Image: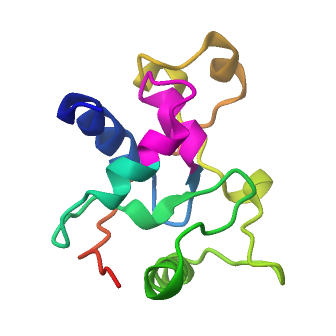
Amino acid sequence: MTAGRWQLIHAVVRRIPRGRVATYGQVATLAGLPGAARQVGYAMHALPEYSTVPWHRVLNASGAISLPGGTGLTQRMRLEAEGVRFDARGRVPLAKLQWRPRATAFPGSSPSRRSSANSEDSHAGHAGNRIRS
């Protein structure tokens, strides 16, 4: 995957507001890369430690953290600090907390998303430094 595609992914992730989450597949689609959920994971993993991209706001399709060990714990702690709550199985209720941006904000968005989207894409938030373990 080219650096240009990763920049598209990072641009989408920067738009996820505090207290909201997106799935890897959702980010891929919004970046104009449908079906590239795994590439979103690679782009998040490749971020330097000092990055301000809020990588912790990206979860798997079931609303769970996919990262192992300390990095997964860091992700959960950052989300909880933003008010995101997890259920007993370690999942975030996507129906309630999944970010739904205005479709016109991203070239890869489909018209069907426009009718059900909300306008919570105006908050970017700062994620701080990424910690790897």
Residue 37 horizontal/vertical position (percent)? 54, 40
When the figure is inspected, residue 120 is found, relative to residue 29, above or below; the finding is below
Magenta-colored stretch includes residue 35: yes
The part of the chain drawn in magenta is 23-40
Vertical arrangement, residue 89 with respect to residue 13, above or below:
below
**Which residue sits at x=57%, y=50%?**
22
Q: Residue at x 49, y 84 (%)?
A: 81
Q: Position of residue 40 (x, y in %)?
A: 43, 44
Q: Quadrant of residue 34?
A: top right
Res. 122 in view: no
- Position of the N terminus, as image quadrant, is top left
- The type of colouring in the image is rainbow
| Vertical placement of residue 108 versus 54, above or below | above
Q: Is residue 5 left or right of residue 66?
A: left
Q: Is residue 73 magenta?
A: no
Residue sitting farthest toward the right: 88
Q: Nearer the viewer, residue 34 or 69?
A: 69
Which of 126 and 57 lies nearest the eye of the viewer?
57
Residue at coordinates 35% horizontally, 85% vertically from top-left? 133
In the rendered image, which quarter is residue 86 located in? bottom right
Residue shown at 49% from the left, 34% from the top: 28
Q: Is residue 101 left or right of residue 91?
A: left
Name above or below for residue 86 compared with residue 1: below
Q: Specify the principal SS of the magenta part.
A: helix
Rendered location of residue 103, percent (x, y): 53, 23
Residue 108 visible: yes
